[in-house]
Amino acid sequence: MRLRNPLLLAALLGTSLLANAHEYSLGQLHIEHPWSRAMPPVAPTAAAYFVVHNQGRQADRLLGAETPLAAKAELHQHLHADGVMKMQQVQAVEIPAGGEVQFAPMAYHVMLFGLQRQAQAGERFPLTLHFEKAGDLQVEVAVQEEAPMTDKAEAHAH
């Protein structure tokens, strides 16, 4: 089949690209690939991960998050303390001007407590991020079996 209408072709291609796109922007902030690992149905918590890029000249702060999937969402980080890795809640995460912050396993993350149910691989759920200056941004968190490969991880694997 040959499409003769270039506008129709552009619309079809644009739709498929948007369906695969998993990035969000709010002002100078760019959120890349929000995801969560699929957990067993009996797991009491889950976590959400993403990367925040600040393309602006002014720092911002992530103050919190919320989702209808959980009764409570908290910002957490992993720390090494006395030779032990532990997790602790933080009140805010600084997003430096011209920089980025990775929310990833064993780093900053959004902990989800009081889950209505565990989301399954292939599903998505809404997560609203609350920034001090940029305001609120709702993203869709993709639930995956495995952590996504990053450019750094892919380069290491070769």
Image: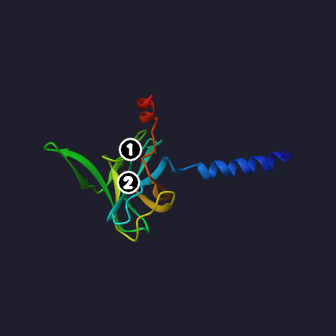
Indicate the position of residue 31 as horizontal and vertical percent values: 48, 49
Locate residue 81, reporting x and y percent.
16, 45
* SS label for mark 1: strand
Question: Which residue does the numbered mark 2 point to in the structure image?
Answer: 62
Q: Residue furthest right?
A: 4
Residue drawn at point x = 24 percent, y = 53 percent: 87
The crowding category of the residue bearing disc 1, from other C-alpha atoms within 10 Å (few below 14, some 14 to 19, many at least 20), is some
Identity of the residue drawn at 51% across and 50% down:
27
Q: Tell me the kind of residue under disc 2.
A: Leu
Mark pair 2, 1: CA separation: 10 Å
The C terminus sits in image quarter? top left
| Position in image of residue 67 (x %, y %) | 43, 65
- Scheme by which the image is coloured: rainbow
The percent coordinates of residue 151 (x first, y second) are: 46, 35
* Mark 2 vs mark 1: in front: 1
Which residue is identified by label 1? 101
Could you tell me which residue is drawn at 29 percent across and 57 percent down?
Answer: 91
Which residue lies most toward the left here?
Answer: 82
**Which label's residue is closer to the chain start, 2 or 1?**
2
Q: Amino acid at mark 1?
A: Val
**Is disc 2 surrounded by few (<14), some (14 to 19) or many (20+) residues within 10 Å?**
many
Q: How many marks?
A: 2
43 relative position to 120: left or right: left
The reply to whether callout 2 and callout 1 are in contact (CB within 8 Å) is yes
Q: Is residue 81 left or right of residue 157?
A: left
Q: Secondary structure at mark 2?
A: strand
Residue placed most toward the observer, 61 or 15: 15
Q: Is residue 80 above or below residue 116?
A: above
The residue closer to the viewer here, 40 or 116, is 40
